[in-house]
């Protein structure tokens, strides 16, 4: 089954999407919501790309690696933004985002000298 080889990344994407959705909702209830606008925007984008990456990996899609490359970039940006805020929900989100960014980079082969996951699996 295609999804089994991506299981760690799928799980990281799922956890990240859940934390981002929770963070965005919690940010909407903060006293200074204007300060949280960028966080909310990135949380929403991150949750969406994580959900897409999760589905593409589960399907064994030929686009999974490229989606995960973009996912890693958005997760990194979201995690960096959330880390700037002291609230617990932002700190949990930052941690999940950074963990997901690393899992997606690894899945997409960015940490393996540029070799894609497909190349690694096929021994190329």
Image (cartoon, rainbow, N blue to C red):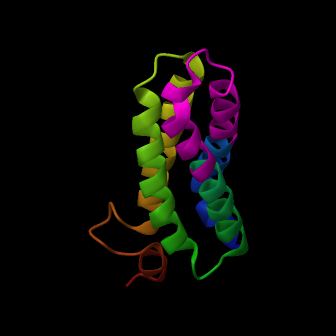
The single residue placed furthest to the front in the displayed view is 34
- Residue 82 drawn at (x, y percent): 47, 31
Q: Which residues are magenta?
A: 18-45
- Residue drawn at x 47%, y 53% as measured from the top left: 74
- Residue drawn at x 62%, y 26% as measured from the top left: 27
- Residue 10 visible in the displayed image: no
Q: Is residue 81 covered in magenta?
A: no
- Quarter placement of the N terminus: bottom right
- Residue drawn at x 61%, y 42% as measured from the top left: 16
- Quarter placement of the C terminus: bottom left
How many numbered dots are placed on residues in this image? Answer: 0
- Residue 21 drawn at (x, y percent): 69, 39
- Lateral position of residue 19 relative to residue 88, left or right: right
Considering depth in this image, is 109 or 74 the residue closer to the camera? 74
- Residue 67 drawn at (x, y percent): 54, 69
Considering depth in this image, is 38 or 91 the residue closer to the camera? 38
The single residue placed furthest to the left in the displayed view is 113
- Residue drawn at x 71%, y 65% as measured from the top left: 55
Q: Is residue 35 above or below residue 119?
A: above
Q: Is residue 88 above or below residue 109?
A: above
- Lateral position of residue 78 relative to residue 24, left or right: left
- Residue 65 visible in the displayed image: yes
- Residue 17 drawn at (x, y percent): 65, 45
């Amino acid at each position: 089954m295609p999804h089994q080889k991506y299981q760690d990344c799928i799980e990281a994407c799922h956890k990240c999407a859940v934390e981002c959705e929770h963070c965005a909702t919690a940010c909407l209830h903060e006293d200074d919501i204007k300060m949280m606008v960028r966080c909310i925007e990135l949380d929403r984008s991150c949750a969406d790309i994580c959900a897409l990456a999760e589905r593409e990996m589960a399907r064994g899609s030929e686009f999974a690696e490229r989606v995960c490359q973009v996912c890693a970039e958005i997760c990194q940006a979201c995690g960096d933004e959330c880390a700037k805020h002291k609230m617990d929900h932002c700190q949990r989100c930052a941690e999940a985002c950074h963990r997901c960014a690393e899992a997606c980079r690894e899945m997409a082969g960015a940490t393996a000298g540029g070799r894609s996951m497909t190349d690694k699996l096929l021994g190329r």
